[in-house]
Every structure is written in C-alpha cells, then in structure tokens.
Image (tube, rainbow, N blue to C red):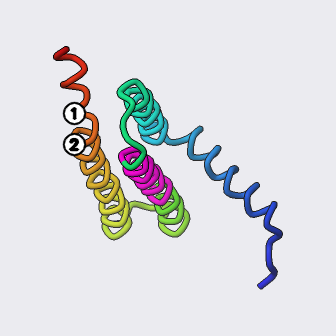
Amino acid sequence: MKRTPLLQSFVHAFSGIYQAWRNERNLRIHVVVALAVCGLAGWLQIPLRDWAVLVLTIALVISSELFNTSLEAIVDLISPEQHELAKTAKDVAAAAVLVLAIAAVIVGLLILGPPLYDRLAN
C-alpha cells in the first residue's frame, strides 16, 4: 500500500470534515452547542482541568458523529436497497452518538452547573 504524504492526509481529513459539515445537520447542531458551551465556560472562567474535560467531551461527541456519518456512507454503498442488517448498523451507530451526547450533557451540567448557579445567585 502506498503511503500518503502527511500534508495530503490533512487535506483528506479536512475534506471529510467539510463534507460532513455540509451534509449532516446533527454535526452542525453539535458544533453550535459546543461553541455555546465554550462561550459559557469562558464567561464562568472555569479551571483549566475542567476545560480539558469539556474539550475532550466535545471532541468525543463530534468524532462519534463523524464515525456515524462514515458508517452510514459505507452501509449505503454496500447495501443501497433496504435491508434489516443495514438498518441495524445505522441505528446502533446513531445510538452510540446519542449515548455520548447524553453523557456530554451530564458532564456539562456537572462542570458548568455549580459556577453558573453561583454566578446567577449573586
């Protein structure tokens, strides 16, 4: 297998992000929510360790959405007709994104909830 130059690998990766951004509404929703969370975290001046947890959590959710998108594309390529196994693959991948998104909300509430409450109470 021929090795792809490093710069070309980045070009392919950014192309994938661009395609997913254009075609996947849920990815755009995740990014908008992530930006809002980062804005709130900045306003609350949360500690650096909490920032690290938020950034990793956001990256996990967005990465899972990208994996889900790629899996859907592969399933559509392999099985363009309706098939129960194709549906199962897509549904389970979507469920994985949902589980991570729910966990991200919990992480966000645990990190941002107390300082937000303190800020609003004063």
Q: Check disc 1 and give the amino acid type.
A: Gly
Compared to 66, does 24 lie above or below? above
Give the side of residue 3 with respect to residue 99, left or right: right
Give the residue drawn at x 48%, y 67%. Answer: 79
Report the residue marked by disc 1: 113
Report the residue marked by disc 2: 110
Principal secondary structure, stretch drawn in magenta: helix
Q: Position of residue 90 (x, y in %)?
A: 37, 60
Compared to 3, does 35 lie above or below? above
Give the side of residue 114 with respect to residue 32, left or right: left
Mark 2: few/some/many CA within 10 Å (<14, 14-19, 20+): few
Quadrant for the N terminus in the image:
bottom right
Range of residues picked out in magenta: 50-68
User: Regarding mark 1 in the picture, which secondary structure is present there?
Assistant: helix
CA distance for labels 2 and 1: 6 Å
Give the residue drawn at x 25%, y 20%. Answer: 119
Nearer the observer, 85 or 60: 60
Give the residue drawn at x 80%, y 72%. Answer: 4
Q: Check disc 2 and give the amino acid type.
A: Leu
Is the Cβ of the residue at disc 2 closer than 8 Å to that at disc 1?
Answer: yes
**Residue 58's disc number:** none
Q: Position of residue 61 (x, y in %)?
A: 40, 51
Q: Position of residue 55 (x, y in %)?
A: 44, 47
Give the residue drawn at x 25%, y 51%. Answer: 103
Quadrant for the C terminus in the image:
top left
Let me know if residue 58 is in the magenta part. Answer: yes
Q: Position of residue 69 (x, y in %)?
A: 49, 54
Give the side of residue 120 with respect to residue 50, left or right: left
Compared to 82, does 45 lie above or below? above
Let me know if residue 49 is in the magenta part. Answer: no
Nearer the observer, 74 or 98: 98
Give the side of residue 122 with respect to residue 77, left or right: left
